[in-house]
Structures are given as C-alpha cells and as structure tokens.
Amino acid sequence: MNFIFLGPPGAGKGTLAAKVASAYNIPHISTGEIFRAAIKAKTPLGLKVQSIIDSGSLVSDDITVELVKERLTQSDAKAGFILDGFPRTIPQAEALEKIILIDSVVNFDIADNDVVKRLSGRRVCKSCGQNYHVEFMPPKKEGSCDACGADLYIRDDDKIEAISHRLEVYRNQTAPLIDFYKNKKLLTDIDARPSTEVILEEFEQKFPNS
Ligand code: AP5
C-alpha cells in the first residue's frame, strides 16, 4: 500500500510510521528526516534548508518534490511506502499525482494544545534519530538513547517560538489537503490522542496487512 501520513506537527506521524514500516515491511519516507540528515552531513541541500527548517517554515515545493520523486524511484519503495510529512501544500499534492498513485491518506487528528505538549517534550537521539518524550515516552536513562546510548537533543524547531509558527504554517498551507484528499475519497481520520499502541491497533484494523 502507498500511504500518506497527514497531520499537524507533533501529531505522532513519525512515531506511528516507524511502527507501521516495520510491521508492514515498507519504507518510512520522512521529508523532514531527509532534510535533517542533509543538514547533519552539511551537504549543499542541508546548508540551503537549515535556517528554513529551524524557523519552522516550509522548504520550497520544487526542492521537496524533486527529492521525493528521486526517493520513490528507489527499489524499496516498489512494494509500498509511507510518505510522512509530504505533501504539505496543494502544489506538492498535485505534483505527487503525476509521480505515483496513492492508496490511502491517513489524517492524524489532534488539538493544538496536545501538539504543544508533545513537541515541547520531544527529545531526539543525536545518532540514530529515535524519538522520545520526557513525559509520554521517556528513555530508560534520562538524556540517553535506549537503542544506541547516544545523547538526546531538542530540535531547534521544537522551541516554543517555532512551534507556534509551525502550527500557523500547518493551518494555512497543509490543512487544505484534508479536503483535497476527502474529495478524492482517499482520506481516513485517525484519533491521534491515545497511546501509539492503541493507534497502531486501529491502523491495523483499518488497513489489514495482507
Ligand atoms: P517534519 O520532520 O516532517 O516535522 P513535522 O511534520 O512538523 O512533524 P514532526 O516530526 O514534528 O511530528 P510528528 O507528527 O512526526 O510527531 P512525532 O512522532 O515526532 O518536518 C520538519 C521540517 O522540514 C518542516 O517544518 C519543514 O521546514 C521541512 N519539511 C518537511 N517536509 C516538507 C515538505 N513536504 N515541504 C516543505 N518543507 C518540508 O511525535 C512528537 C512527540 O510526541 C514525540 O516526542 C513523541 O515521542 C510523542 N508522541 C508521539 N506519539 C505519541 C502518542 N500517541 N502519545 C503520546 N506521545 C506521543
């Protein structure tokens, strides 16, 4: 199945996508992760997008579409994939229609105050990228990754000024995709408030793994 995970920042898209990718054996393609890896490696793309991402604005449609187009040609995406954080604008969604067919768009439904709690408590592993939350998903040892032992850090775009800007960007540029995909009868809403285990169960019921 070719999935899109749609929803506000901090809704839990990345956390669920990692679990679905492993359960369904399909790649989790996160445009945010691709950009962060480029920033870490100081590639020309990374240097170009760093300040945009830190502030919580969107990278241009042409850069992002090209990146996804290239990623979807890789062999692991042939049997299905999860696009997490793409598309994020109507022009990106229109461009995607010319690249590949999408089976389902999963819309993560969550209120702004929960988003703020999730993002302000998020901690990320510097080495393997594993996500934690100081309250909801704490690591076994404070400040260290359970998986690889590396230090955890706070993303620049998880600082409070950037969070409110990201929510505004989401409302203005990304939320219109809900109607875009509803009109195409591709949208399924998921309540993003429960635990990841409960959401995964709901997901597996809605999209049985054949
Ligand atoms: P991206 O990395 O995609 O950021 P985002 O969409 O803002 O999503 P997040 O990663 O912040 O949140 P999430 O929904 O994945 O939540 P998570 O699972 O981590 O993009 C970053 C930037 O890159 C953008 O701002 C933009 O600049 C650029 N970019 C990316 N794609 C682009 C595009 N298509 N076009 C243009 N620019 C683009 O969870 C959040 C926290 O909550 C974690 O701490 C987690 O532990 C916790 N949590 C998760 N689920 C639960 C749960 N069920 N219960 C309790 N806590 C939970």
Image: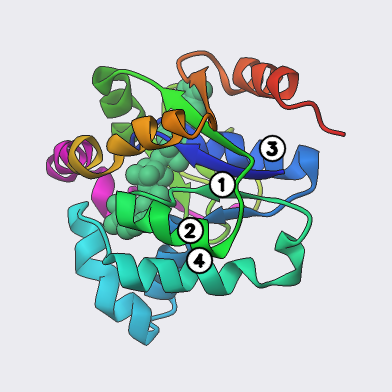
The answer to whether residue 96 is seen in the rendering is yes
C-alpha separation, residue under disc 4 versus residue under disc 3: 20 Å
Q: Nearer the viewer, mark 1 or mark 3?
A: 3
Q: Mark 1 or mark 3: which comes first in sequence?
A: 3
The residue tagged 3 is 20
Task: Find out whether the residues at labels 4 and 2 contact each other: C-beta distance under 8 Å.
Answer: yes
> In this figure, which residue is indicated by the disc labeled 2?
96
- Position of the N terminus, as image quadrant, is top right
Placement of 2 over or under 38, stated as above or below: above
Image quadrant in which you'd find residue 17: top right
Work out whether residue 155 can be spotted: no
Report the residue at 72% width, 27% height from top: 207
Location of mark 4 (residue): 68
Q: CA distance from mark 2 to mark 1?
A: 35 Å
Q: Quadrant of ligand 1?
A: top left
Q: Quadrant of residue 117?
A: top left
Compare marks 2 and 1 and give the one earlier in the sequence: 2
Q: How many marks?
A: 4
